[in-house]
Image: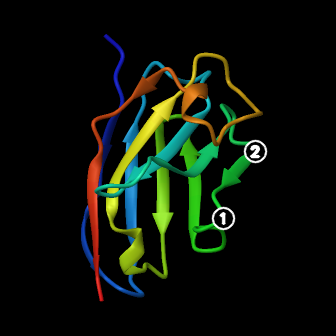
């Protein structure tokens, strides 16, 4: 059974950095996205990367602060988060689509598989 497993969450101070990992064995042909969900809010698109890493996409609230990357040999996608803000506090999920999408990567409906999530808490 294929699955996505996130790790790397935790507590950080405002202005600090964290790196999240998404282990994605079996998803080498998938676009991988990161989404986040804070309590009482809708799931928000954070970033996405295409199967060979040639295209990346970012949500407006994280552009310039977060970087998504992909280690194809390790079947792992990373989300490097810097200049963290308290409003970045959320559960972060990675997700995989079935077709290696280059469009609509910001939509949750694009993705077929989801990880359980990892908590990120940013203190002020």
The front one of 67 and 74 is 67
- Within 10 Å of disc 1 (Cα), the crowding (few <14, some 14-19, many 20+) is few
Residue 95 at x, y = what percent? 47, 33
Question: Which residue has dot 1 on it?
Answer: 60
Q: Which residue is mark 2?
A: 55
Q: Earlier in the sequence, mark 1 or mark 2?
A: 2
Q: Compute the Cα span from label 1 to label 2.
A: 16 Å
Q: Nearer the viewer, residue 72 or 27?
A: 27
Residue visible at 62% across and 21% down in the picture: 29
Q: Quadrant of residue 9?
A: bottom left
Does residue 45 appear in this view? yes
> Which one is in front, 114 or 25?
114
Residue 91 shown left or right of residue 59 in the figure = left
The image quarter in which residue 28 lies? top right
Q: Quadrant of residue 23?
A: top left
Report the quarter where the N terminus lies.
top left
Crowding near the residue tagged with mark 2, few <14, some 14–19, many ≥20 C-alpha atoms within 10 Å: few
Query: In the image, residue 102 lies at what x, y percent?
Result: 76, 33
- Look at the numbered discs 1 and 2 and tell me whether their residues touch, using CB distance below 8 Å: no
Q: Could you tell me which secondary element the residue under label 1 belongs to?
A: loop
Look at 40% across and 74% down and name the residue there.
Answer: 87
In the picture shown, does residue 19 fall above or below 105? below
Residue 74 visible in the current orientation = no
SS category of the residue bearing label 2: loop
Q: Residue at x 34, y 33 (%)?
A: 115
Location of the C terminus by quadrant is: bottom left
């Amino acid at each position: 059974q294929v699955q996505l497993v996130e790790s790397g969450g935790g507590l950080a101070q405002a202005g600090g950095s964290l790196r999240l990992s998404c282990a994605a064995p079996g998803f080498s042909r998938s676009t991988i996205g990161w989404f986040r969900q804070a309590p009482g809010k809708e799931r928000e698109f954070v970033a996405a990367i295409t199967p060979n890493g040639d295209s990346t996409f970012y949500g407006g609230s994280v552009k310039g602060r977060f970087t998504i990357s992909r280690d194809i040999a390790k079947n792992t996608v990373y989300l490097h988060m810097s200049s963290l803000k308290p409003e970045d506090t959320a559960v972060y999920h990675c997700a995989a689509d079935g077709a290696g999408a280059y469009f609509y990567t910001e939509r949750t409906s694009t993705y077929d598989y989801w990880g359980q999530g990892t908590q990120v808490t940013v203190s002020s």
